[in-house]
Amino acid sequence: MSHLLSSIDARTKLVGENRLELLLFNMGRGQVYAINVFKIQEVMSLPKLTIIPDSHPVVIGVTHLRGHTIPVVDLSAAVGMGRHKVDKNSTIIVTEYNRSIQAFVVAGVERIINMNWEEIMPPPRGSGASHYLTAITKVDTRLVEIIDVEKVLAEIVPYNTKVSDDVLDTAVLQKAYGRKILSVDDSSVARTQIKDTITSLGLEVVQAGNGQAGLDILLKAAEKTGNAADEFLMVITDAEMPVMDGYRLTTEIRSNPKLADLYVVLHTSLSGSFNEAMVKKVGCNAFLSKFQPDALASAVQDRIHNLYG
């Protein structure tokens, strides 16, 4: 089933075009779910599992794949829908998030679809289902729910947001005390992580849930000051988001004279050479893989040092 996945070259053509590819799958209950293809390494039949004592309740075992031992998560159980009946017909989706590889067992996969981010909407506020969703969309009149995988993983292995004492440079941070940083991310877990780390540095965080909302904030700041960089020390943006992704957001920033001076960091759960290449293509200043509080703090301090000397 690995033939379902597109090549890296094909993916790069979507960058800056505000487009994405979604893998549609189901968990045996009729509802259709999706994960961004960017995060997927492979789709395959459920391999032999080894049970690990005292593991998290939603981790059903580990498997050995291409020289790595990876945990296999029951995605249905992880999002509060009850355990999936694992059998020979089950499928795993092997993914990379935050520099780690894990697999999610599902009932089956359907197909890959190519969409515009403008067709992807945030989940309705107040809906119970939104707890584990970053977005929703419609495909062939069917509602498709896009899973917040970062939240799922954070509940299995909680993230640390504390910056190490030996990383902190108080003298540098004091130069920018109280300045604003714009954080743009569709995951509530990621926004909380970023805010906790940045505020501990003595800086203020303004948040947006997608690229369009972030762009609106920047345009409003530019109207007020003439240059959004006067109000915001930097922009930290996720890559994949509903309505407008981080690549398109960066493209919009660079094409607007009142925004072009902004320092933009792409902060994404997908690591590796692909995103590093895309940083150069769309004009980001730096790339960080989630979630590394020390690396994030260092990036902020480097920006302050370069700006203030």
Image (cartoon, helix red, strand yellow):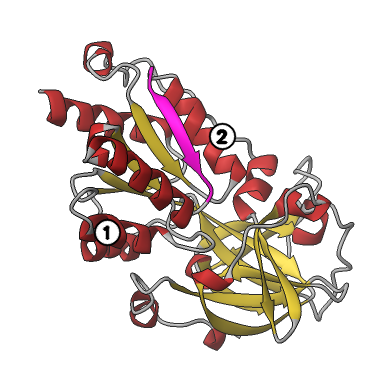
Dot 2 lies on which element?
helix
Instruction: Determine whether 175 is above or below 229 in the image.
Output: above
Q: Residues within 10 Å of mark 2 (few under 14, many from 20)?
A: some
Residue 33 position within the rendered picture, expressed as x and y whole percent measured from the top left = 72, 70
The residue under label 1 is: 279
Q: Nearer the viewer, residue 196 or 214?
A: 214
Q: Quadrant of residue 47?
A: bottom right
Residue 298 highlighted magenta (yes or no) = no
Which label's residue is closer to the chain start, 1 or 2? 2
Residue 85 position within the rendered picture, expressed as x and y whole percent measured from the top left = 89, 68
Instruction: Determine whether 92 is above or below 226 in the image.
Output: below
Q: Residue at x 73, y 49 (%)?
A: 125
Q: Left or right? Give the position of 85 relative to 139.
A: right
Q: Residues within 10 Å of mark 1 (few under 14, many from 20)?
A: many
Q: Is residue 45 visible?
A: no
Residue 223 position within the rendered picture, expressed as x and y whole percent measured from the top left = 30, 42
Q: Outermost residue, left direction?
A: 309
The residue under label 2 is: 192
The majority secondary structure of the magenta stretch comes to strand
Dot 1 lies on which element?
helix
Boundaries of the magenta span: 202-209
Instruction: Determine whether 179 is above or below 99 in the image.
Output: above
Q: Residue at x 48, y 69 (%)?
A: 38
Which amino acid is tagged 2? Thr
Q: Quadrant of the N terminus?
A: bottom right
